[in-house]
Image (tube, helix red, strand yellow):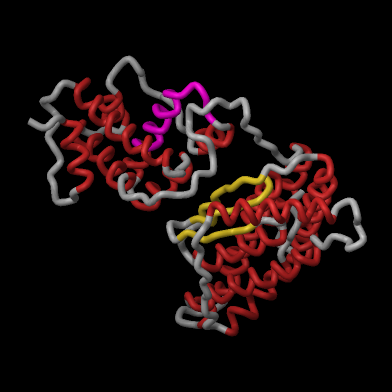
Amino acid sequence: MSSLREVLWRVAANRRASLPRTSSLPPAEVDDAVQWVLRRAFEHLWEHGWLPYDVYEVVRRNEDERALSVLVDALAVEASRYSALHPRWQEQLAEIEATVWWDAAEPYVDQWARRHIELRDDAVAAAVAVLRVLIMLPSLPVILPKPGTPLAAMDHHHVDPRILNRVRGLLAKAESTAFPEEAEALSAKAQELVTRHALERMPLEAATTTSRRLWLDKRYFDGKAQVVHVVAQANRCRAVVYDLGFVALVGEELDLEIVELLSASLLVQATRAMVAAGEKARKGEEARSASFRKSFLLSYAHRIGERLRTVNEVPVDDDRLLPVLAERKKAVEEYFGAMFTRTVAKSTPVRSAAGWDAGRSAADRANLSIS
């Protein structure tokens, strides 16, 4: 007779298979089976490049809140198994609020059911829904040490907290102001601040080339990914778009942090401007169409790229910086080439001239500052 572990795995792999009835089984046996199948799936994913936030995002996009809550709890259990976690692992777990809220001495599944006013079978169904997503995921490039790896050799450089706070403050103001000119000035100041900070520390610090993943909302994904791409280019990074819903970034640690901050702010500004452009239009008019909004974002990204390149220009006679920049560029290109051996260029057509014009105008008003 098959064990409950095997049954749960088989049901996850075959959507036509029926979920087992667990109400008559010992709570500990059900809990053991649920924990085992999820742990087995996690171990495979960590070996193949996945991180906690990646798993969280892909389940969030494919399943309901019940399944997502089971996943977050399972990640909390998974983290507790290891004595050593990379700092970015810890940051991601904190971001999704993965904590052990239940009594670890008692079976988790029944405690989850009571908390959500559900039956035990409902809890098991939610766990199987999570497992069904996890076992279908493809391999990703490994960008961080697996959990349990000793932390002695792990470096994790951040932007100076004082700079970061100023950047976030500027971007928050840029996103909230009703005056386009003010938003533009604030964004420009932020980008100028982080660029100056990055260039000043370059000759003093060794480069730490690495990779991050920036998940984006799937609606108008191509245009949003293009915004991230031009921000990455302007900040000495490379970008690859994944249809799963994220942009993979390669660059020096501090530059990547800047890219994440500025991209997030510019996307907020772009979305606000895009929605505003259609608010005055009546239903059925071009300004409220998908083609208008896609063209808007592509044009916005193109113009933002032009502006960022101007802001980030390095004096050609700077003998101190140019060799460092060349060395950093080489390191990024080599890391990128080793990680992504096969990439395909993709073009996205622009189908709305009005959307293109509106996007360019919005980009001219966007705030480029990060501080």
Where does residue 153 sit, x and y in percent of width and height?
A: 63, 29
Q: Is residue 187 above or below residue 151?
A: below
Q: Where does residue 265 sit, x and y in percent of width and height?
A: 65, 55
Q: Residue at x 33, y 49 (%)?
A: 63
Q: Is residue 314 left or right of residue 291?
A: right
Q: Is residue 274 above or below residue 128?
A: below
Location of residue 104 (image quadrant):
top left
Is the residue 359 above or below the residue 66 in the image?
below
Predominant SS along the magenta part = helix
| Position of the N terminus by quadrant | top left
Res. 322 image quadrant: bottom right
- Highlighted magenta segment, given as a residue range: 70-85
Looking at the image, which residue is at 18% across and 43% down? 11
In-front residue for pair 338/52: 338
Q: Give yes or no for residue 79 being in the magenta stretch.
A: yes
Q: Percent x, y for residue 34?
A: 26, 31
Horizontal side of residue 78 vs 95, given as left or right:
left
Residue for point 54% across, 44% down: 143
Q: Residue at x 79, y 60 (%)?
A: 312
Q: Residue furthest left?
A: 1
Q: Position of residue 356 (x, y in %)?
A: 61, 79
Residue 120, picture quadrant? top left
Left or right: residue 103 compared with residue 82: left
Q: Is residue 192 magenta?
A: no
